[in-house]
Amino acid sequence: MIGLKLVMLGDETWIKLFPTLFTRQDGVSSFYVKDTVEVDFNVSRHLEFELAAKDWSVLVLHYLGLDHVGHIGGRRSVLMTQKMKEMDDVIRRVHAASLQDNLDRTLLVVVSDHGMTDGGNHGGSSYEETDSLAFFIGHSVESPYCSPYDQNEALQVDLAPTLALLFGVPIPKNSFGVVLPKLLNSLTDDQKLRMLELNSWQILRLLQAQVSAFCLEDCINVESSIELDILPESIEQKLCFLLSKAISSHQSSRLHRGSDFKSVEAGYYGTAADNYHTFLRNASEWLSHRATDKPLYLLVSAIMLMTMSCLFLMGTVSYLFKGRSLSQADHHSESYLDQRWHLDEVLVLAGMFLYVISLGSSSFVEEEQYTWHFLTSTLYLIFLAKAVQSMLKGSNPTLGHKAEGNSFDRSSFFYATSYELTPGKRNGYKLCTILVVLVAGRVIRAWHQGGINWVHFPDISKLLAQADPSVVKSLQIISVLAVVVLFSISLTLLRARPEFVIGVWLTHISCGFLVLLHVWGNHIGTSLPINHTTASVARQFYVIASVSVSVTVLASPWVFPIFSREAKSPSSGSSPVKAIHGIRKSLVLTGMTYTAFWGLLQLLLQQPINAIPLFLILLQTVSSAVHFSLDKTLHKQWVQVVAMHFLGMAGHFGLGNTNSLASIDVAGAFIGISSYSTVLSGILMFMITYASPLMLYLGLVLHASVKDVDDASNLRQLKWSYILDKIVTLPCLFPLLINSLALTSYTIVLLAMRNHLFVWSVFSPKYLYACAATVCTYVGVSIIAMTALYSCAVFKFRARSYRDKSL
């Protein structure tokens, strides 16, 4: 704004963008949402001075507290009414100052850039998020009566040209907004038409930049005899015709200026104004669509590369799986789960195919949680049927001999933890673990009425939100204690190196205590602006948890013995299963440490109302790993890995996530952070959003620890490549394959739907989630691979050193 003096108070984003533009400025951080008081106080403290000053032309007050209150406590937060009254008082003070000074040419503009959902977030396309305020008081606004029921709709892009023309400055060159006519009531008809003409010239420049063939002379010389009902088919010709009509009617209005007949003059003015608005609206809408057009050949080329990558990965998995099946057939005389297709395998393949097909439907994308809940519950019901069937076979005397002889499966979780089971207990555990997963899944499903269309339906989370805050706090405390108890029980089964295990257990207890302190320090339903005590507690948790997990991962392969107590010396032909018993114990401890500390971290970061679902997801993870370890003949390993992936996706939506950006929890991303940091808050936000998938990826480390490895007769002949194949290859490749299929398929869908009505409100946000899920998959797979490779490398080195010393 050349020649105008501006004062900027509030969001520092504008100061960073235009550091030399403002005469005076005082910026505040817009991203640190925990602050709801100081962020507005730093603006209001300048009001008295600035309202008395006479040296500025524009005063900008950018308040952020109302937005921060929404992010923290939702639109019904107890702080919301207080904050809105505070904003009302600010508006009253500014308006009173303008009236006191008789500033007839002062315009007070009150605007909001977005609304918010019930949860306080925004970024989606729902009415609650896009319904924002624009309130004009003062100069050029002539309205003797303002009804709360008389609401005029406008686009946010229309604000820029309107204010620019009222200030008498050029319209921003990239603006394709349309001037708001009701703000021009104080102007003469000629002035109004001149503003519409300037707005049209601005739009015309953008049209010429987009379409080089768009010529102004052609628009002026177009045949005026063309009627509107026979508009040309070309959009360029249509816009050219509309502009020529506006210019022609404007010239006619000038010719009849000062006519003795006011009705004639008003008629020509009305025709010219209507023609200008018709051109402006059509051109603005076309430009808004044109701005998102991309070269089709580039998009197709990228999709072809993605498809080739996906097919290559499918071929690799197919080749490895085929070779693995042949190897297993050689090692098992009665064949490994035989070569027939089983119902769970058919469901997995059919389910993934149907999921890919469903991505082409906007309704299925909006309500994707139903797909994952259905696939997960159906798959585990099949697991339940197979478990019951195996129990019935085991009770048959003619079929039970083999089952009884294999009652102590070497690959079981309990073998890895040196805890023996009788056949009866084994069957009971197989049945109970599946029932735990199914019951927990049903509770998670009912916790949040997820999705977009049914989000307002009653669910458990809404009932708890209306209940006494002490109820939610009690559930938080119970969840924290349950995670600590579950981890403690798991550690008691590890009967080796008790000193190291006790050290890990004590750090976990300490972290659990810190989470309880954080829960106790935060009042549910209210949010203090900045609670330095809880922030310090959170930072202590981050340090202790990071150190504990790192030490456990790095030290456990060195702590556990290479051989079990029953193992013989390497030269005596000892069982290789006993020889690598330490690997299993190491991975069991590492996997439990991953999942338990991740559970505590999420209980610290997530909304308090998600405490119970988080514990249930952890319980599902451990129960699935235990179930898959109890009988290797029930399910193939790739089915087990896919089942864990299904659990992760079902839990993702069970925590209240959707395919709308509005469901992202922003408030939790600042726990333990005293000032805004893009990197740290971004990492925490990613962890919160993908808490469940990452939990299941970490659980795959525990799952990999109980895989059967019996490929050699002694340690000298032990094939480490086969061990890595068991505990690394499939747990890593299948998540990558599933993600590659989903991402490639959805990219094709997005290209096909680029002109769909819901491309921006439904398909585009889902694609952002698909890309973020790809990052999540790579992070999870990297953790699995690095943990397993490191453990195997250490044990291989230790085994070689032990063998050399024995020679």
Image (cartoon, helix red, strand yellow):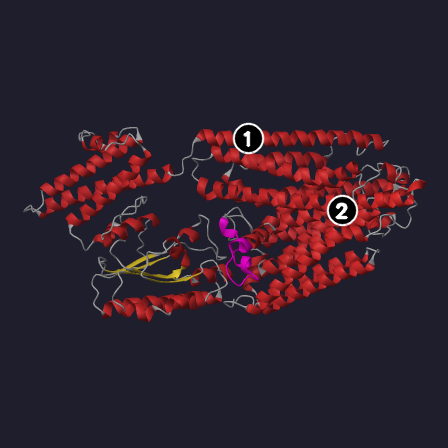
Q: Amino acid at mark 1?
A: Leu
User: Residue 372 is drawn in which quadrant?
Assistant: top right
Can residue 75 be seen from the camera position used here?
no
Q: Is residue 528 above or below residue 254?
A: below
SS label for mark 2: helix
The residue drawn where x is 52% and y is 46% is 659
Q: Is residue 94 above or below residue 581?
A: below
Q: Position of residue 535 (x, y in %)?
A: 57, 65
SS label for mark 1: helix
User: Residue 350 is drawn in which quadrant?
Assistant: top right
Q: Is residue 202 above or below residue 17?
A: above
The residue drawn where x is 89% and y is 43% is 404
Specify whether residue 666 is painted magenta. Answer: yes
Using residue 93 as the reference point, say whether residue 690 is left or right of it.
right
Q: Position of residue 653 (x, y in %)?
A: 58, 49
Quadrant the C terminus occupies: top right
Q: Nearer the viewer, residue 793 or 420?
A: 793
The boundaries of the magenta stretch are 661-681
Choose mark 1 or mark 2, whichever is in front: 2
Mark 1 burial class by Cα count in 10 Å: few <14, some 14-19, many 20+: few
Q: Nearer the viewer, residue 207 or 527?
A: 207
Q: Nearer the viewer, residue 390 or 44?
A: 44
| Label disc, if present, on residue 305 of the rendered structure | 1
The residue that disc 2 covers is 791
